[in-house]
Every structure is written in structure tokens, then in C-alpha cells.
Image (cartoon, rainbow, N blue to C red):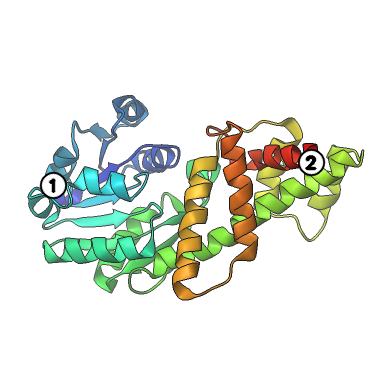
């Protein structure tokens, strides 16, 4: 097998690991790397090759998918701003699947193109469970030829993919979608808290909600977590705060009001301050309960 026929995957966190596993189990010739090597072991068991460094991934793969934590992690992994960056990315297609600021993505594309590589934005909507089940929604931006080449790779991971034109159209679309996600989960938690504090049967409240027009895949995923207070991570509080910040920055840049998002930002910051850094976003319930306790 030639190196151009293999796919690389960098970043095996909460989202990256199940995404890479979907690819490996779909017989995608895969080579993976993660800063914490232990996260690679399930991929090794699934038949993927495991690299000891990002450079080894680029040395053995023509297309490299990145699901890295943030802008600093991407720059450090690629050696961006150092002499190693150009030779590393030249001749490769890099697919940025995480969430960063649109401006960062635009500048990353410019550097990759200048070095002789290709670049595709492909952020995904969904959390850990949809990632495990291959039901993520991809938003794809970049030059048409690069998008067309990458699209088949997304099929095992994403139930649907949408072309969003040039960079940073996909990330802007992702941020717009995340406004609805964040405000929806926060509203669900506040509704649950209201019902509980008024002595309503919480199971019946959620059954009524689920029977009506407000029911959604999000409510059906998060409602059981509120009921059982199982806040194991699907979308972590720090990640929600990061997304919230990115949306707010993009809104301010465009002169767009975001009052609901701003209220949510305060609540998630309070949740983090209460010590729930390892909890799912449904744990925003703790911040609501704390505010009630201060009334």
C-alpha cells in the first residue's frame, strides 16, 4: 500500500477515539497518534497502526484527520511557526474536524496552502454517543476538489455531510448550530429544576416533555442524565465553555447580539467554578441549583 492510500488520525479524546474506531472498523487503512499513548490501544486492537509521533503519521498517510483540543494543540502538533511545518504538510490533505475560531481556520488554511498542502474544514455536530454510532453531522468547507476527496472518508463517522462552501463556512455553521444546542440543554435543565422544586414527579415531567413537540434527540439524550444525576461526559463543561466563547467572539466581530448565549456562558462558568470540570454539559443543573440556594 502506498502512503497516499493510508489515512492518518491525530487526537483520540472523547470524540476522536470513537470517530477513529468507526473508521478502523470500516476497514479504512488508518494510522493514529495521540499525545497520551494509552488512548491508542483500542485502535491498535481494531487493526489501526499506531504512530509514535505526528511526523510518523504524515510520513505514512496522504490525508490526515485532526480532532485536536484547540488551536494551541493544532499548532504544537503540526509544528506551525517552525521550520518543520512546511515539509510536514507539503503534499498532504489536512482535515480539521475540531472546533476553533473561524479566523484561526482561515489563517491555518493559508499557511497549509502556501506550504503546498490542501486543507478541508469538517467540524462535526454531535457528542460521544453519536460519534460511537456513526451519526455525527459533518459541515465541510474548502476547495471543491479537496472536499470531494475527503467526503468518502467521513461516511463511516457521519450520518450526513453538508457542503458549506469556502473556509470558514463550515466552522461558522458549526457555531450557529451550537447556539441552539447550548441554549436547548440549558433550557431543559432549567425546566427540570423548576419542575423538581415545585414538587412535580420528575419522571412524569420528562414523559410529558417527550410526548410533546419539544421532544428531540438532544432532550432524549440529556433528560435521563438529569433524572439520574449521571453526568458522565458526552460533551464536557470546559468544551461547552470553549464553544460558547468562540461563538461570542464571532458574534461580537460581526456586531451580532447573543443574549441567550451570554446567559448560558455565565451558567457554564459557574458550573465549572463549582468543580464540575469532568462533567457533562447537563451538569449545568448544579449552577441553577446554586443560584436557587442563594435566593
**Residue 257 seen from this side:** yes
Picture quadrant where residue 112 is located: bottom left
Instruction: State whether residue 256 is above or below residue 218.
Output: below
Extreme-right residue of the structure: 199
Place of residue 13 in the rendered image (x, y in percent of width and height, measured from the top left)? 40, 37
Mark 1 lies on a secondary structure that is: helix
Place of residue 1 in the rendered image (x, y in percent of width and height, measured from the top left)? 14, 44
Camera-near label (2 vs 1) is: 2
Q: Earlier in the sequence, mark 2 or mark 1?
A: 1
Picture quadrant where residue 268 is located: top right
Q: Observer-nearest residue: 27 or 19?
A: 19
Label 2, on which residue? 292
In the rendered image, the quadrant that contains the C terminus is: top right
Instruction: State whether residue 186 is above or below residue 203.
Output: below
- Between the residue at mark 2 and the residue at mark 1, the CA separation in whole angstroms equals 58 Å
Residue at 18 percent across and 35 percent down: it is 53
Residue 3 tag number:
1
Amino acid at each position: 500500500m502506498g502512503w497516499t492510500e493510508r489515512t492518518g488520525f491525530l487526537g483520540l479524546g472523547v470524540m476522536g477515539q470513537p470517530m477513529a474506531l468507526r473508521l478502523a472498523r470500516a476497514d479504512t487503512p488508518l494510522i493514529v497518534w495521540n499525545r497520551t499513548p494509552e488512548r491508542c490501544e483500542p485502535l491498535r486492537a481494531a487493526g489501526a497502526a499506531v504512530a509514535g509521533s505526528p511526523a510518523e503519521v504524515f510520513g505514512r498517510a496522504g490525508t490526515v484527520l485532526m480532532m485536536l483540543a484547540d488551536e494551541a494543540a493544532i499548532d504544537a502538533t503540526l509544528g506551525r511557526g517552525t521550520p518543520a511545518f512546511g515539509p510536514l504538510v507539503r503534499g498532504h490533505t489536512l482535515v480539521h474536524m475540531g472546533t476553533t475560531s473561524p479566523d484561526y481556520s482561515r489563517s491555518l488554511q493559508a499557511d497549509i496552502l502556501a506550504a503546498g498542502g490542501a486543507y478541508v474544514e469538517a467540524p462535526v455536530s454531535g457528542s460521544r454517543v453519536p460519534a460511537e454510532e456513526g451519526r455525527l453531522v459533518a459541515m465541510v468547507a474548502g476547495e471543491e476538489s479537496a472536499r470531494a476527496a475527503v467526503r468518502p472518508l467521513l461516511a463511516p463517522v457521519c450520518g450526513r455531510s453538508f457542503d458549506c462552501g469556502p473556509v470558514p463556512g463550515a466552522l461558522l455553521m458549526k457555531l450557529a448550530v451550537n447556539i441552539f444546542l447550548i441554549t436547548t440543554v440549558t433550557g431543559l435543565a432549567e425546566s427540570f429544576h423548576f419542575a423538581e422544586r415545585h414538587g412535580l414527579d420528575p419522571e412524569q415531567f420528562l414523559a410529558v416533555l417527550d410526548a410533546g413537540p419539544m421532544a428531540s434527540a438532544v432532550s432524549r439524550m440529556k433528560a435521563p442524565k438529569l433524572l439520574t444525576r449521571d453526568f458522565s461526559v458526552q460533551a464536557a463543561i470546559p468544551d461547552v465553555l470553549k464553544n460558547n466563547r468562540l461563538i461570542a467572539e464571532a458574534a461580537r466581530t460581526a456586531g451580532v447580539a447573543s443574549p441567550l448565549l451570554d446567559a448560558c456562558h455565565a451558567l457554564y462558568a459557574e458550573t465549572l467554578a463549582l468543580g464540575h470540570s469532568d462533567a457533562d454539559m447537563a451538569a449545568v443543573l448544579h449552577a441553577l441549583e446554586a443560584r436557587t440556594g442563594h435566593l
